[in-house]
Image (cartoon, rainbow, N blue to C red):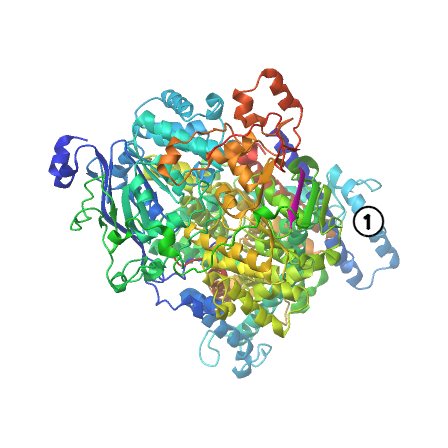
Amino acid sequence: MTTEYMNEEHATVETGDDVVLEVTDLSVTFPSDDGPLPAVREVSYVLRRGEALGIVGESGSGKSVTSMAIMGLLPRNAQVEGSTRVLGQEIIGLNDKEISKVRGKKIAMIFQDPLTSLNPVYTIGYQIAEAVLAHKKVSKQAAMKRALELLEVVGIPSPEQRLRQYPHELSGGMRQRVVIAIAMANEPDVIIADEPTTALDVTVQAQVLDALQRARRETGAALVLITHDLGVVAGQVDRVGVMYAGRIVEMGPVEEVFYRPRMPYALGLLGSLPRLDGDASDRLTPILGSPPSLRDLPPGCGFAPRCPMARDRCHEEEPRLLLTTGDTGGESSAADDTIVHRSACHFSEELAGVEATDLFQAGEEREKAPKDAPETLVEPEVLLSATDLVKHFPIRSKGILRRKVGEVQAVSGISLDLREKETLALVGESGCGKSTTARLLLNLIKLTSGEVTYMGQPLQGLTDRRMRPLRKDLQLVFQDPFASLDPRMTVSDIIGEPMRIHGDGHRDARKRVKELLELVGLNPEHGSRYPHEFSGGQRQRIGVARALSLNPRVLVLDEPVSALDVSIQAGVINLLEDLQDELGLSYLFVSHDLSVVKHIADRVAVMYLGKMMETATTEQLFKAPAHPYTQALISAIPLPDPIKERTRERIIVTGDIPSPANPPSGCRFRTRCSKFANELSDAERTKCVEEPPELLDRGSGHRDACHYSQVVELI
Amino acid sequence: MSENGMFGSTRKGAKKKDSADRTQLQTILIRFTRHRPAMISLVMLILIVLFAFVGPFFWMWDHTVYKEIPSNLPPGGEHPLGSSAAGNDVLAQLMRGAQQTLKVAFTVSLVSTVVGSMWGATAGYYGGRVDALMMRIVDIFLIVPLLVAAAAIAGNTGAGASWSAIAMIIAIFSWATIARVVRGVVLSLREQEFVEAARASGASASWIIIRHLLPNAAGPIIVAATLLVAVAILAEAGMSFLGLGIQLPDISLGQMIGSARTAVTTRPWLFYPPGVLLVLICLTINFIGDGLRDALDPRQTRVRR
Amino acid sequence: MLVYTMRRVLGALPVLVLASILTFVMIDVSGDPLADIRMQQPPPTEEVIQQAEARLYLDRSMPERYWLWMTGIGGNGDIGLLQGEFGPSTQGPHYEIGPAIAERLWTTLRLVGAAMVFALGLAIITGVISALRQYSKLDYTLTFVGFLALAMPTFWLAGIMQAAGVKFNQLVDEQVFATIGDGRFRAQGEPLGDQFLNAFAHMALPTLVLMLISFASWSRYQRTSMLEVMNSDYVRLARAKGLRNHVVIRRHALRTALIPLTTVVAISVASVIDGAILTEVVFQWRGLGDFFITAVDNNDSYALMGWLLLSGVIVIVANLVADLLYAVLDPRIRYE
């Protein structure tokens, strides 16, 4: 941009020449049949050349809408107010021709879901070259050449071949790197990445974040990283803004915000996070309640209804985003200085030195009961036991004959024991077979071979009728709180259904439903409502209540908290812990989230491509992981701690998870194993290729399936 | 045609009532009443039904009477819509014709929906080879041109003497569309977690189908059944026009148009009224179907992003 | 792609066989080809009836007759679809079904083809406009027109059009539209320009009718499909790249939104044929519609079976073409 032009704009002169993006009082409102919906309110920030700014917030906080508004990508009916300047040029209200010169050229964007971001009918090369050709007058061949370079930069193997492939032929992680390549095609000044790794597995997330960093190095672009993951933010950005109910409520350098939050919400968010680097025996401190509906926001501070320190003023007057240090007279309108810490709280100075536990646990009296870990002298009874579980799903042709043309080896030889009152976690990335294993244990799908016993009784081959009494003891809680409740039934009917199935839905049932609602922390009078009237966290509690209605002994929890926002998740985790203590339940906890697992589990089993990689007590596994996959998994999880996250040592896993229809020979992990690639000799590798490692005890019940396992300390 | 109807959305939002106070049925009703074309259509359809079924009791002429009336009377006087070549009162014929047409169409829709839902639900629930085979049979019924096939059989059997026979013949060729809709819905519902939750509690297949699958498939079934009424009306009209549907002395709207085919310009009162009525019936039904689709689709939020 | 094609073709065969069985059984059970003979006054002798039965193969069992109808093995050489013979007609030994159908097939296919091409064009244009101007007055108008077209009985619209054509001719005092007949015989031997004008005069109104009847549901479908694609992530990414709006719509949205339409159009070929029959009757064309009515009037079972099976084949072929087109348009299917 010319300096002349910028001199005419007095606002930008003050902020200096290196400002690439300046957002001032940006508000977005969607009209709806039930009244206007203010999705974003008065958001302001500046971004300097080469800087990385993180925007964190839960779903519905307006963080994605903000970035869409900046790009001018919102639907036509959205009302956008305020100003957005890219290199001094106002871009709100530009016409199509003008804005298309800015998009992609000065400001580029990466979207959340790589599976839908690329047009399925064009080749990768075409789609990258198209971005080049949109702004540069070069030949098609030159554009293709540039596309090839870009693919190399983002680290895609055999890029020439990829150019001619279609999106569906690439994995999710690979596609997201293609999107990054498109974003950097014209060396933009700003890249906005909207949840770029949310849809990906952790090991792939690490690869994509790496590609994003390389893209920034190459282009010198500033980054706006939008995410709900505090760990990702901690390691990737210089400054961070926290959004809540459409507003930025806290903003400052990442260390300031993480170590010295000055807004109760930010404090609560950090406190409600189960941490890989924390002490598992600490009880999480959830934020009570759920985010307000944008349609009827409270008049004062949006967080006041959930804030333990809210006073009258908080309910009347909306706090402004002000400096936290020194005088409080500074206005938020010109976000001129990038190193200061601002927060939107009337009483932010009172938060100096306050811990989340001090603030949020006041209302919660229950202490986390100490785990009876030392009592291992008497082994508790084994309730559910699996031996050599195998499940192959046939791949059938589409014709009427439906010939079997292959097999997906979802589970290939899994053995595990679930003991009374313990929590066994089954962890792994997508496609590892953990959910299939859970369903095999409940006899919900037929196993190909192997054996499942419940209290010594084999389950496989039982008829539905014979299985039914056992189902009382074995219950299931699902991941998706929206899909797991029948939308056409009332909550009472949903919770009472298992009782009716088992023929005891009489008079007592109503009482029992009320008890259950109370037990899971819901208002017992709400039984006549329908699921859609509840929030995600509340629905998940309904799902738990349903599972408990038959007084089970074993609960299989399939990713029970992964669809929930952080502040809600903590409450459900606490509930599960309390229920276990009160009712003496055994949990099989299926999850991809090691932080949650570390918090809740007694023992952990790590799966990869249908095989067990490592099993150990939680303590052993996180302190001294032995299998290279476990190590990679732990190392790939970003810690919500800026200093630790930047300084820790990493084990990077290369490549994508192979297809379970065609798993590698020998050790299934070898294709991505850094030990295999970097440390082993050829002779040693041969063993990995030829011989599938067995799950062997390395003492004290810690087992791993690696020929060359070696304990490493990572946290 | 899978399509979220579009007329129902009033841009300036009605005042929002706390959603927690509403039952589902109320929500559906509120949504439907907000769909203005559907509401107008519903009122009109009710009027047409009254005209067809109650009207004959009040109208002075019976549709079978012809000797007392001069032929080819232009509209006016005692015969507001004139009289036919044989001397029948056109208004009386119109009532009777609409009545027969509606009877046929609703019967077709009912029979097809029952048969099609059962067929589709079975195929969808069991999946695999059963599904492949059952849906192949559905395909066969879909590839035969409905009107021609139905007309051929009606012509062969001389079914035109009774409206119920005509309805059955049309139903033979129209249940397949319902089966396809239901099968698609059930196929996706079957994978829902709440169905698995019921299975995990030990629910039997019939429990799941009755308590979970059918209630959740009700929306698409009702919509498809509604739209099928319009399809059946047009099919019956086409058959009658070809002379292979309802036969004289009984009468239907299609047949009235057919016999007035050569009199479009000379005696327009014979040609236009039955056509307009036919279009009105189909149009109102299609709009009602559109409104129902809007109202019954639980995913449809009123916020457009 | 070759494998895919082969698989599709092979997959269509069982449907074809089942369709032939359905057609045969339906017509065979419902019709009595000898009804007219039996009704004759004075009543025909037993011998006459037996002769007719033998000629029409009614003396054999139904499965036998189906086999005969398909293969012609054991027949008198006038039956057997695989040998190109459609079977004996009740309209006398000299009436050959095969040539009669062939003669009229072209007339009907021409109408169906022309109407479908125009309807498709109209559907795409209106569908895209509706989607791009969602909830505008234009969108509401187009939607209303679509609903009206869906509610319109083909033959009634045809009747109105015919009357309008006559009116128009009177008004301009020239025979612009031919409102009766398909005009096939009149034009032979005339100069090319006249032939074209003649064809246009006859084709214009029926094509218009059939097009209006057919386009509505496709247009609605195209609108939905277009709206879905316009809200997709890849269209957003295309915009984020800095492509101009019209480029995004043409290259990314329209291109992808057209794919599912192929299937929808193929499925509705059957109903277009229905519409064509009615339209032909109104405009008094000597097409398959006329053939069909004659066949029904004469209880001509083999003619009806041949007719229905032929239309079934047309629909199956159309679906096959759509499947292949789908694969060409969508690389995800291509490499299945």
Answer left or right for A429 relative to A1.
right
- In this orientation, does residue C247 appear? no
Q: Residue at x 52, y 82 (%)?
A: B59
On the question of residue A196 being in view, the answer is yes
Q: Is residue A133 left or right of residue A530?
A: left
Q: Position of residue A214 (x, y in %)?
A: 37, 27
Which amino acid type corresponds to the residue marked 1 in the rendered image?
Pro
**Label 1: which residue?**
C63
Q: Residue visible at 48% across and 23% down?
A: A157
Closest to the observer: A493 or A634? A634
For residue A660: magenta? no
Q: Which residues are magenta?
A: A413-419
Residue A318 position (above or below residue A430): below
Q: Disc 1 on helix, strand or loop?
A: helix
Work out whether residue A250 or residue B301 is closer to the camera in this orientation and state it. Answer: A250
Indicate the position of residue B11 as horizontal and vertical percent values. 34, 60
Q: Quadrant of the C terminus of chain C?
A: top right
Q: Is residue B181 above or below residue B83?
A: above
Left or right of A480, for residue C74: right
Quarter of the rendering containing residue A702 = top right
Horizontal arrangement in the rendering, residue A533 relative to residue A301 (left or right): right
> Where's residue A669, x and y in %?
58, 29
Residue A418 on the magenta segment: yes
Magenta segment's dominant SS is: strand
